[in-house]
Amino acid sequence: MMLVDDSAIIRGLITKMISPDPGIEVVASVGDGAQAVKRLARSKIDVIVLDIEMPVMDGLTALPKLIELDPNVKIIMASTLTERNASVSLKALNAGAADYVPKPTSTGKIAAADDFRRELVEKIKTLGIAARRDAGRPVPSATAKQGDKTATAPSSLYSGPVILRKATNVLPPKILAIGSSTGGPQALLALFAKLKPILGIPVVITQHMPPTFTRILAEHITKASEWTCTEAQEGDVLEPNHAYMAPGDFHMEIQGTPQEAKIHVHQDPPENFCRPAVDPMFRSVTKVYGGNVLGIILTGMGQDGLKGAKVVTDAGGTLFAQDEKTSVIWGMPGAVATAGLCSAVSPLEQLGPRIMDFMGKAGR
């Protein structure tokens, strides 16, 4: 992998954090986008962690040049939690970046942030395997000894067969609940472009993102589709044909009755290392709507949503998932697809029409 940041201190600290993992090798560390482009032209690199704000050539300018040099390279944008950088990060995702990571605001926080290290290591390893697969190059085995350490493949990868669930007595959905993570912003924009706001039911979304990012993503969905999507707030009453995005660093749950369902946001401990997490959202919509739930799992690392999806299907609800080919990472959708919880596993471009078709049939 290659680190690109104008701060040598930040590059050194991140290298120190991730180097102990035997599944990661930092082969280059450079201070701006122009140097990154030159280095990629000479070397085969699977993953690049790319800062946004740098002299000479910033991250957004370097991004298309890097992808042009190697269409299979996976780029993680590194961004501070400012409104401007959140907006730039989302533009970068739409321009081909695979993921992003929020940089702590001080070097002291970087050195102490176990969560930051865990998240970054998982993303680098998972995206590195995806890059090798896309390029047709050998993928490391699940375990590989290096000295006295053992590298393990990320738990967010699934390769088992898809097991479709045969639904009987299908109930008409009264709410659409969507969960996503890595690759999710791009997938959500593509989904809502094909999903028309004539469903007559509310939509709730949990996307693994930090504060500020979720509000801006909701605004992007509103601008890029026919939907009104807003960041959820405590006490919001769910309205049909309106989409609600879980706010960064808050779980989102639904309370009340199907006739008057309200949003409750809270900061209970993370689930699956995530806050917001998909599992509590799925559990809560099932409590309110019973089996009248249609759940969607889009691209993402890990298996957040798996336990909640079982609650949905056990109650008689229906679950769809994005397929492996169109997922940036087939972790979350792979978990539910191989567990036999999905009634459909579809390419991203077909999910919107499939949802519309299912709503029409289930509503009869």
Image (cartoon, rainbow, N blue to C red):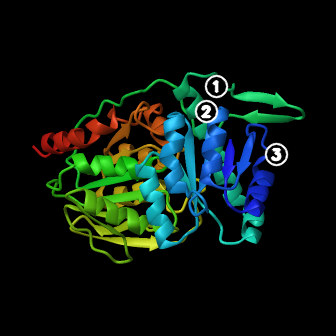
Q: Do labels 3 and 1 touch, CB within 8 Å?
A: no
Q: CA distance from mark 3 to mark 1?
A: 20 Å
Point out residue 118 in the picture as x, y percentages from the top left corner.
69, 52
Q: On the image, which quarter does residue 364 sit in? A: top left
Looking at the image, residue 102 sits to the left or right of residue 321; the answer is right
Q: Amino acid at mark 2?
A: Ile
14 over 73 or under it: above or below: below
Q: Residue 129 shows which numbered tag? A: 2
Q: Do labels 1 and 2 touch, CB within 8 Å?
A: yes
**Closest to the observer, 275 or 279:** 275
Point out residue 225 in the picture as x, y percentages from the top left corner.
23, 56
Residue denoted by label 1: 139
Q: Quadrant of the N terminus?
A: top right
Q: Amino acid at mark 1?
A: Val
Residue denoted by label 3: 20
Q: Residue 275 shows which numbered tag? A: none
Looking at the image, residue 21 sits to the left or right of residue 126; the answer is right
Point out residue 167 in the picture as x, y percentages from the top left corner.
28, 34
Q: Earlier in the sequence, mark 3 or mark 1?
A: 3
Which residue does the image show at 42% across and 48% down from the upper left?
95
